[in-house]
Amino acid sequence: MNSPSPHAPFTVLDVGGTTLRIAEYAPETGALSRVRRVPVDGMAQDAEAPVPVLQERVVAQLVREIEAHSAAGPAPRAVGVAFAGPITAAGLVLAAPTVWGGRGEPLPLGARLTARLGVPVVVVNDLTAAAWRYAATEDEPFCLLTVSSGIGNKVFRGGEILLDADGHGGELGHWTCDTSPDAPLCDCGGRGHLGAIASGRGVLAAARRAAESDPDGFAASLLSALTPGGRPAALTNEALAAAVRADDPFATAVLRSTLTPLAQAIASVFTSIGICRYIVMGGFALAVGERYRRLLVGELARLGCFGLAAEGVDAMVALGVADDDHGLIGAGRLLAERLPVPAGQGVR
């Protein structure tokens, strides 16, 4: 890679379970350009490959993509990687269930990339990166929540993400909120986790169960009309979101039932550490939109947030920006805020 100019942009990447996004980030303007998407060379491409093999494939792919991106434009001053997995303060990727499956050995991704590329590389958890996006515009501590195929969170306070050095924290999706033996199964293998109940996948599973147990109520709902053949097994999140937006009673009742444990989780964060701002993002929540926010606020108000009146509860919850640039913008803003950092170091 050519030597970067001191005024060169950053290269930023967002690595998820299926898609790798790479872009150029201009720290002076905060603008993204040259955004490109490619499939990740992980378990989505080869589910039978051992974890160490997939780790090496992903590292090699990141090097190739960064070098190709730089060859078509200016060499970057630094590289920021938003990665779907817990990251320690030392920059180790501890696990990446959606990228390479099993836990495997901790991967010093930042150090490996820095050694290969010759420029500083900072690796950060994807939701941590997203929190840095909002840190630029929020003037008070906040908790960022994502409600998509799973649930995650990060608390930003005093210029930092609240995590310990080993990356613990920000995993409300794995809080056990249903202790019954037949509680929904989480992707991690545990039962009754918040993510298995209140995520997009969890709500969809709840809607299918409700449709099977109450066929007359389902048949009378808009949700049935939006489902191919009116078959519960054919229900989709898109149909569910559309029915809730239209205030369909059946779909709304299903969603409201899954919002109870999510509201309990938010209330516990509020009462324990006094965070009064919650930004909700993620594909499912943003697909439902303002209706999702109002239903969540209603459940929070019903449960009660100690010391807050209804107006205060409503002011606590906001929707995030409806795009998929959170990790890219956040990684760029983190680099702009934190450089220089030791080569290969992670940022929690």
Image: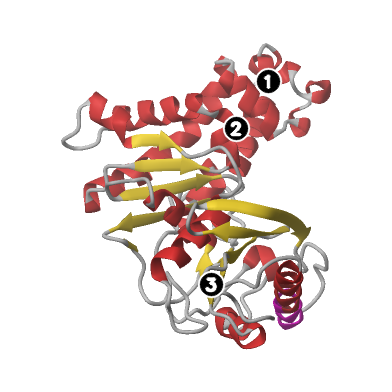
Magenta region includes residue 250: no
Depth check: give the residue in front, 324 or 193.
Answer: 324
Nearer the observer: mark 3 or 2; the answer is: 3
Q: Are marks 2 and 1 in contact (CB under 8 Å)?
A: no
Residue denoted by label 3: 123
Q: Position of residue 255 (x, y in %)?
A: 53, 30
Inter-mark Cα distance, 3 to 2 = 29 Å
| Scheme of colours in the image | secondary structure
Secondary structure state at the residue bearing disc 1 = helix
Q: Position of residue 55 (x, y in %)?
A: 70, 78
**Residue drawn at (20%, 27%), measured in percent from left and top?**
309
Left or right position of 240 against 41? left
Q: Residue at x 55, y 15 (%)?
A: 247
Relative to 58, does residue 271 appear above or below in the rendering?
above
Identity of the amino acid at label 1?
Leu
**How many angstroms separate mark 2 from mark 1 (CA)?**
15 Å
Q: Is residue 57 magenta?
A: yes
Identify which amino acid the numbered label 2 is placed on. Answer: Ala
Q: Which residue is mark 1?
A: 223
Disc 2 or 1, which lies upstream in sequence?
1
At label 3, the amino acid type is Val
Horizontal and vertical percent for residue 267? 30, 42
Please rate how many residues cluster around mark 2, counting C-alpha atoms within 10 Å: few if below 14, some from 14 to 19, many from 20.
many
Q: Is residue 318 above or below residue 199?
A: above
Q: Is residue 245 above or below residue 188?
A: above
Secondary structure of residue under mark 2: helix
For the record, the magenta segment spans: 52-59
The image shows residue 165 at horizontal and vertical percentages of 38, 77
